Every structure is written in C-alpha cells, then in structure tokens.
C-alpha cells in the first residue's frame, strides 16, 4: 500500500513533463535565418527540469462535541493561502494511506514515575495504529537524543525498543548531521529531538508523516530553539502530536510550548493526568491518524522565494473545526 501513496507523485510529475513539452506543429520545415544551423542539425540536449508545486494538506475535522466528521465532500472545503482563496486540485478521504510515524519518549528525570505507564500505553498504541505498509521509529531524549529503533514495520523490534527506554541512561546517541553536539547537554533536549526526528529522519520519507511525543514539554538543555524545531517539522510536512505527561512533583508541564508545536503543524496537545487518560489520549490520536482528509492545490503565488506562507482551511459548515498545518515554506529557486 505504500506504493499507492507514491503513485500520485509519479502521476503529477509525468503530467507536468507532458505539459512542459512544446505543442506539435503540422507546418512544413521552417526557413533558417542566415548564419543559423539547419533545423535538423544536432544540438546539445538540455536537461528537463520539472517543478511541481502541489501543496498537500492532511486535515482532521471535528464538530463542537469533538466528534470526528468523515462525510465531507471537496466542495465543502475552502483553502486560503495568505488570504487568497485557492482552487482544490486533489481531494481524498483515504483511510488506508500509509503512515510514517515517529514515537518520541521523554526519559528525563521528571518522567521517572510516569515512564512505566508510558511504555505500556505506547506499545498498545503502535499495535493498534500500525497497518501493513506503515513504518515507525522510536527515539528517547533526555541529556541525549537516542534512536532506539530505526524505521521498521516489525512490531516486535518496536516493542523491544520501547521497553529499553531508561531514565537518563547512557546510550549510543542518534547520528547527527550538522553542528548540533550529540553529548554534553545539561538538561532535557526536547527541541533537539524534534529537529533530528524531522530533519534527519523524516525529511526523505513520502506520504503522511507524524510524530507522537510523550513529554512535559519542558526543555532545559537543547542547543536549538523552539523555532528551529517547529521549522523542521513544517519543512518536512510532519504533524506533531504531544501527550502532555507531567508529574505534579515537577510542575504542570509547559502547555504553551506543546500547543505551539502542535497547532502550527496540524496536531493536537492532550493533557494526561493518569494512566487511564494516557490510554484514552493514545486512542484519540490513533483515531485521528486514520480519519484524515487529503487536499492538494497549486498555489496562485508562483514565486519560488523560500518564504513561509500561511494556510487556513474552513468548511461550509460553520460549526466544524478543522485541524491542519497552518503554513508551509515555498520552494526556493
């Protein structure tokens, strides 16, 4: 089924190539101006450059009672980019589209009492949400950012990785590309973990991408900032979901940071106060991952300036709430 997820990309690319070709002419051979080579002379072949600017959006819709709405049609959606309405070119409600998922677990000292419950709930979550064709990875973060399981569909491998999570345990850190140090931190590396998961691991993946983070959203040691983590998620079209698990002994967690990361990328922040709520939160995320609409459009703004563009999605039903990313970075020339 992952192959089906890539078929649309191939189709759009082939279509763009066909449209880029010059129109066929039935006229006779053109007369060559003086000094010009004959029309049938061999000329160096120029590479074909295909620039496909289709913007894909994954949207979840709920009513005022927080019930998922799954019966909307294309004509009931409206997309605005920087305030300008866009024409929807692609629409689907494909519940079986493959998912590439990152599970990030906070293993700093403030999560010590919560970790066993997190491990149990996370294992049940992956067993429920993953289907054939899906991939997942497991990352823990505290003083380091550690990759415990790379992308795989093997649930046994993922289960063992989850159970290996330990509070502030020394492990082999994730391979870092760029200037970010891998060790020597003095606190919880939440922002570094999000950046590495998106920039280093999810950037080359296609289709639906999401990360689910169990954390109190307190960052006390990252070399990068919140803005860097958020930009990495936006540039890779990754939806961020956060289960805000905060031990009362260490405060109530940083809800402002959690909501900034989730609301800007189209995800959700769910506050978790006990084991029952933790399982319910995982169930909600699992349901949402399988109940998304897919919308695509070609921006009316053709500039390839690399700038951030704001997106807003509404429906013709005024009492519905649409959850989707709030913008993207335009391609750069």
Image (cartoon, rainbow, N blue to C red):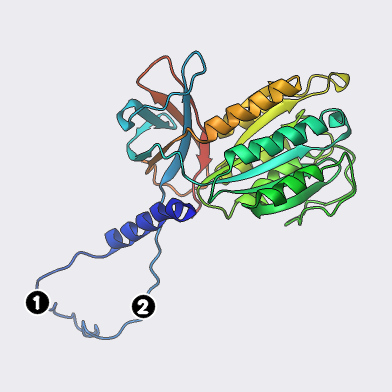
Q: Residues within 10 Å of mark 1 (few under 14, many from 20)?
A: few
The answer, for residue 253, to whether it is visible in the render is: yes
Q: Residue at x 42, y 14 (%)?
A: 319
Callout 2 secondary element: loop
Among the 4 quarters of the image, the one containing residue 40: bottom left
Horizontal side of residue 110 vs 29, given as left or right: right
Residue occupying image coordinates x 40% and y 71%: 47
Q: CA distance from mark 2 to mark 1?
A: 23 Å
Q: Residue at x 33, y 32 (%)?
A: 74
Q: Position of residue 152 (x, y in %)?
A: 64, 53
Which residue bears the numbered disc 2? 45
- Count neighbours of disc 2 (C-alpha within 10 A) and say few if under 14, some if 14 to 19, many if 20 or more: few
Q: Is residue 125 above or below residue 252?
A: below
Could you tell whether 65 is left or right of 88 in the image? right
State left or right for residue 307 relative to residue 12.
right
Q: Nearer the viewer, residue 80 or 109?
A: 109
Q: Which mark is residue 131?
A: none
Identify the residue at horizontal 56%, vertical 48% (top origin): 134
> Is there any visible trace of residue 227 in the rendered image?
no
Q: Label 1's element? A: loop
Q: Which mark is residue 28?
A: 1
Counting every numbered tag in the picture gives: 2
Report x, y in % for residue 210.
Answer: 59, 40
In this rendering, the answer to whether 21 lies above or below 29 is: above
Observer-nearest residue: 156 or 287? 156
> 243 or 184: nearer the eye?
243
Is 160 drawn above or below residue 21 in the view shown?
above
Rendering coords of residue 216 (x, y %) = 77, 28
């Amino acid at each position: 089924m992952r192959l089906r997820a890539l078929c649309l990309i191939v189709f759009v690319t082939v279509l763009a190539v066909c449209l880029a070709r010059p129109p066929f002419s039935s006229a006779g051979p053109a007369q060559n101006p003086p000094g010009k080579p004959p029309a049938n002379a061999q000329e160096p072949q120029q590479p074909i450059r295909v620039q496909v600017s289709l913007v894909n959006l994954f949207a979840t819709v709920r009513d005022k009672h927080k019930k998922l709405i799954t019966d909307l049609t294309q004509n009931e959606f409206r997309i605005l980019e920087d305030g300008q309405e866009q024409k929807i070119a692609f629409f689907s409600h494909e519940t079986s589209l493959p998912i590439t998922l990152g599970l990030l677990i906070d293993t700093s000292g403030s999560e010590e009492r919560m970790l066993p419950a997190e491990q149990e709930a996370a294992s049940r979550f992956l067993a429920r949400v993953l289907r054939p064709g899906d991939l997942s990875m497991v990352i823990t973060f505290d003083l380091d950012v550690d990759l415990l399981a790379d992308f795989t569909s093997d649930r046994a491998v993922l289960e063992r990785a989850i159970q290996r999570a330990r509070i502030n345990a020394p492990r082999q850190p994730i391979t870092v590309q760029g200037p970010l140090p891998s060790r020597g931190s003095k606190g919880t590396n939440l922002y570094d973990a999000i950046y590495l998961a998106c920039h280093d691991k999810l950037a080359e993946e296609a289709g639906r991408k999401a990360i689910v983070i169990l954390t109190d959203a307190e960052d006390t040691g990252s070399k990068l900032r919140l803005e860097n983590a958020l930009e990495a998620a936006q540039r890779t079209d990754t939806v961020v979901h956060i289960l805000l698990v905060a031990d009362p002994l260490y405060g109530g967690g940083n809800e402002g940071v959690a909501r900034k990361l989730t609301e800007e990328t189209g995800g959700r922040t769910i506050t978790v106060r006990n084991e029952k709520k933790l399982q319910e939160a995982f169930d909600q995320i699992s349901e949402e991952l399988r109940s998304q609409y897919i919308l695509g459009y070609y921006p009316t703004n053709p500039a390839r300036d690399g700038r951030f563009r704001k997106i807003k999605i509404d429906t013709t039903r005024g009492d519905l709430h649409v959850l989707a990313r709030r913008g993207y970075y335009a391609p750069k020339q």
